[in-house]
Amino acid sequence: MNYYPIYLNLMDKRAVVIGGGKVAERKIQGLMEARALITVVSPELTEKLHQYYKAGNITWKKKTFSAEDIKDAFLIIAAANDPEVSFAVKKAAAPNQLLNLADNPEESNFILPSVYKQGKLSMTVSTSGASPTLAKKIKQNLASQYGPEYRDYVDFLYDCRKWILQEITDSKLKKYLLSAITEREFVTSTNRQKDFKDLLDKWNQS
Ligand SMILES: C[C@@]1(CC(=O)O)C2=NC(=C\c3[nH]c(c(CCC(=O)O)c3CC(=O)O)Cc3[nH]c(c(CC(=O)O)c3CCC(=O)O)/C=C3\N/C(=C\2)[C@@H](CCC(=O)O)[C@]3(C)CC(=O)O)/[C@H]1CCC(=O)O
Ligand SMILES: NC(=O)c1ccc[n+]([C@@H]2O[C@H](COP(=O)([O-])OP(=O)(O)OC[C@H]3O[C@@H](n4cnc5c(N)ncnc54)[C@H](O)[C@@H]3O)[C@@H](O)[C@H]2O)c1
């Protein structure tokens, strides 16, 4: 399968997860970070999911799946540990709903990658279903190359790029600055604002 990678904005979108086990828990954590409106349909929940329910982070329908549970869903994840349930979810879903069956990528219209995040920086790894374990290993390798320092650094890039696009009209200077701030010394710098000002001064003097 030739998948099309995409980053979804799920803010306030209805997401329904069928099943309340380990796999559902992992997928729900991602959905919570994306601020989706999450409903979990399951007779039981893991301890963590129960905490999220108690804290009001998710809605819990304490029942087995039935077709009306996904009526208004933008995105659906079936993780109930029963192929019959996956089949029933697939049958009930409309063709234009986003559907992931955790046990059946072929019958899903999207799959999930392994995700590594440091603030605004995120990296996603997929093996198109060949080996989720390899995807996880590669993610761990990335984590050792792009540490927590990238969180502040990418925030700096966000602000700095906004400033450059607003303030700099000379296209050569704009291109130079947008590239210079991604050089290694900016990642490790202890005073990025000063280093940036130095760059500008140097350009103006030349
Ligand atoms: C990346 C990650 C994201 C996430 O789930 O959030 C993810 N699986 C993860 C882990 C993982 N999954 C499994 C194991 C046990 C070892 C093994 O079986 O290999 C481990 C390892 C572990 O848990 O350590 C078992 C498994 N997974 C699938 C099946 C069904 C099948 O293949 O038919 C079965 C057999 C179930 C069974 O037989 O019972 C299917 C899928 N799993 C996917 C994603 C999609 C393809 C992604 C890709 O290949 O790139 C896809 C197609 C659909 C989907 O779920 O979207 C997450 C890493 C989280 C992290 O980074 O920490
Ligand atoms: N995609 C992945 O990353 C991945 C990884 C491992 C396993 N899996 C697959 O994901 C599924 C779930 O695995 P798990 O380890 O979380 O299982 P689990 O047994 O821990 O959890 C299953 C959950 O589904 C609930 N459930 C059972 N019948 C239901 C029904 N009719 N309606 C609603 N909820 C129901 C149970 O109460 C339980 O909460 C399995 O099919 C497994 O093959 C996928």
Image (cartoon, helix red, strand yellow):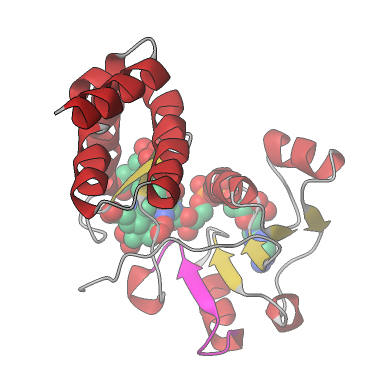
The answer to whether 37 appears left or right of 33 in the picture is right
Q: In the displayed orientation, state which residue is furthest to the front.
A: 205
Q: How many marks?
A: 0
Q: Where is 203 relative to 162, above or below?
A: above
In the rendered image, the quadrant that contains the N terminus is bottom left
Q: Is residue 101 magenta?
A: yes
Residue range in magenta is 93-104
In the image, 125: left or right of 154? left
Q: Judge by depth and name the residue closer to the eye, 198 or 13.
A: 198
Q: Quadrant of the C terminus?
A: top left
Residue 187 visible: yes
Left or right: residue 54 versus residue 7 is right
Q: Nearer the viewer, residue 98 or 161?
A: 161
Relative to 106, is 184 above or below?
above
Q: At 42% across and 46% down in the image, what residue appears?
A: 167
Q: Is residue 181 magenta?
A: no
Q: Position of residue 26 (x, y in %)?
A: 53, 44
Give the vertical position of 134 relative to 183 (above or below).
below
- Image-quadrant location for residue 188: top left
At x 71% / y 34%, what residue is drawn?
47
Image position of 3 with respect to 72: above or below: above
Task: Pick out the residue farthest to the left.
Answer: 206
Q: Residue at x 67, y 75 (%)?
A: 73
Name the spot of residue 59 as percent of width and height, x first: 81, 56
